[in-house]
Structures are given as C-alpha cells and as structure tokens.
Amino acid sequence: MKNRINFAEPNIDNKEKKYLNKAFDSKWIAKGAYVNLLEKKLSKLMNTKYSLTVNNGTNAFLLILLSLKIKKGDEIIVPSFCYVSPIHMIKLMGATPVVADVEQNTYQVDPKNIIKKITKKTKAILMIHNFGGICNIEKIENIARKRKLFLIEDISETLLSKFKNKYVGTKSSNDIKKISFSSLHATKTLTTGEGGFITLNNKIDYIKLMQIRDHGIKDSSKYFYDKIGGNFRLSNLLAAIGCAQLTKVSLIRRKKIFLNNFYNMNFKNNKNLILQNEEKNSELVKWGFPVQFRTKSNKNLVLKKLNKSSTLARPSFLSLDQMKHLKLNKNTKQDFKNSKFLQDRILILPMHTKLTINNLKYICKIVNSV
C-alpha cells in the first residue's frame, strides 16, 4: 500500500519542541511571557496596532460578538457557503445570521448579495475567505464604510496570503470599523495546536476584548470585575509553539505558494475541471486546494479513488441551508443557489508543507485520470 498522504500536517519539528521546553521550564504554563511575545509578533507581522491571542478561532469570533454586544434581533450577514463554526456562535448569541450567496467562480460571498441583505437590524458583515481564496475585500469594505456597519473578517483559511503586497487581515483605513481573526488549529497554515488570535487597531475595542477574555476583570490584584466575561485565554505552552511557528513564515509561504502554482499548472488544461478564480493582485497561501468538477459523479469518483489509495482529500463544505438546525432564510431558495451548486462539485486537496513532489504528482495523476 502507498504511504498515507494526510489532508493536513503541521510544520512542526525540534524548533517547536525547544520553545515548548523553555515554556515548560519557566513554570508559567498558563499565562506567561510567550503569550505576550506571540501577540507582539503577530501585531508586527500583520501590521496592526493590537493583537490578542485566544484559546481557539471559534472563541475568537464569539469574543468579538460579545464585545459588540450582539443581542437577540440583531442581524449579521454571512456567506451561504463556509465552515459552520461562526454561524453557530451567532445563533448562540441569539442573533440572526442573514445569508448572502457566494460567487460561483470564486466561492466567496458576493458583494452584490450583501447589499441586498442589509436592513435596519444589520449590525455587521462577516467576511470569510473560503479555502484560501480572497473575497473582494475593497468592495466589501466600501459597503461597510458607506452603511456604517462593523466588518468582521475571518482569515483562518487564508492566513499569510497577501493582497496588494499586504497580508490579508492587516490594517485598513481608519474610517472602517473592522476586526480580523484567525484560527491556529493544527490544520491551519500556522498552528499552536488549538488556538486563535484577533487583530485590530482601535484601542477602546482592544481593552474591551482584553477584559472579556479574562472574566471581565478590571484589576487583577483586587479581583475587581466590571464586565461579564469568560476564560478565552491561550496557554503559555501553546503560545510558545506559536512563537516557533512565526520563525518559519517565509519558508511556509514559499512552499504553500509553490503548491498552489503546481496544482494550477497541472489542472489548467483539464476540461473536466474548473479552477477557483483567484483575486487579482493576490499571493495566495491556501488552507486547502479546491477543485471544482463539472459533474457530481466525477467528484465522487475522484474522492473515492484518492481515499482508497490512502490520500485523504475532503469533500466541500455544505451549503448552509442543508443544516436544518440553523433555520436560515426559510423563504428564499435563491440565497443558496450557487452554494448548493458548488457543494456537489468541489473537492479539497491537501495543501500542507510536508507534501513531496512525488505526492503532488500522484494526486494530480488520479484527479486528471477522471
């Protein structure tokens, strides 16, 4: 049997072990110096005034919602096609996720559909960059600016990608109320095992997030609290792994950009495939490589062949209307037209940095054989 090709595999080695041992020896395994160091390094990398580490990406988004005081009746515009985690957090807050369909060629939320969904109850737009592609950032930021809406940006699947030579999730113009966040899960481009972070530029929002992250504390020396909060903190041990990861940014980016180019080159002449339309002026570091098949049967056949040969590819996300427990947009099927089309045709291929040339050739051979 061929060696197993994992869907995801973190880029970890003795460097992470060295940092982890230092954190362990310091005896600071909860809060500690590596948490502060990781936050400083993330702010520098992302060119934002502030960054805040948290225990996972889902809670990063929940923390943002709590800081915005999202409540029952508030509406947040979300893409119809994405990982379900942030949608669950909106529902947990008692708010209403309002679905805007995605573009069929980019798999990203359609700015025209966002505009159609704005009401007096709309509080924010959730912009999720699917699979490592990039949304039409400039158009969506312009919508948020004109309508005076908060823009929440999920960069988990496009972490370390660049748009116009700036990292996605970096500082925007001061007239946009925007907060970005990312998961640092083991499957992501950078990892702490479990973890996440938030980047922003507004000091008042930063202080508020800091308090809510730590039980709403005002003065730790007196156990004094003045906000409702919880425990969203990242441990010093996991932060140490994150600091080691940040020493590899250039290496990881180069390999991931190579992988994206390799797949594109090997699939571009296959008439049975449609490749994701990539935003101009972008340099993509993808979480996974999405391949769109012209038929559902071909997609299923390739998935079966890859998994049978111990190559772990993944099917697409589901269109959100397939998850009945969410009870979304009951009255209009049009909101899910493109996402329902894509869910049956997209396959996600491995994009991790441990892939070899032989691994890539093997994957491409199976995909192209169908």
Image: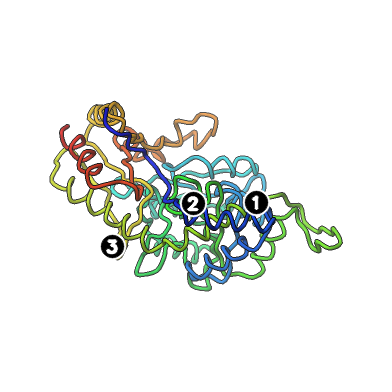
Which x, y percent locates residue 176?
52, 68
Image-quadrant location for residue 160:
bottom left
For the residue pair 89 and 232, the one nearer the viewer reads as 232
Which x, y percent locates residue 66?
66, 52
Q: Which residue is mark 3?
A: 280
Q: Quadrant of the N terminus?
A: top left
Q: Amino acid at mark 1?
A: Ile
Looking at the image, is 316 positioned above or below residue 78? above
Callout 2: helix, strand or loop? loop
The label on residue 191 is 2
Which x, y percent locates residue 58?
56, 46
Marks 1,3: beta carbons within 8 A: no
Q: Amino acid at mark 3?
A: Lys
Callout 1: helix, strand or loop? loop
The residue depicted at 24 percent of the width and 54 percent of the height is 261
Marks 1,2: beta carbons within 8 A: no
Q: Residue furthest right?
A: 222
Q: CA distance from mark 1 to mark 2?
A: 29 Å
Q: Earlier in the sequence, mark 2 or mark 3?
A: 2
For the residue pair 64 and 60, the one nearer the viewer reads as 60
Q: CA distance from mark 2 to mark 3?
A: 27 Å
The residue depicted at 53 percent of the width and 56 percent of the height is 18
Which of the two marks, 1 or 3, is nearer to us in this view? 3
- Structural crowding at the residue carrying mark 1, measured as other residues with C-alpha within 10 Å and reported as few (<14), some (14–19) or many (≥20): many
Q: Amino acid at mark 2?
A: Thr
Q: Residue furthest bottom?
A: 174
- Structural crowding at the residue carrying mark 2, measured as other residues with C-alpha within 10 Å and reported as few (<14), some (14–19) or many (≥20): many
Q: Which residue is mark 1?
A: 70
Callout 3: helix, strand or loop? loop
Image-quadrant location for residue 213:
bottom right
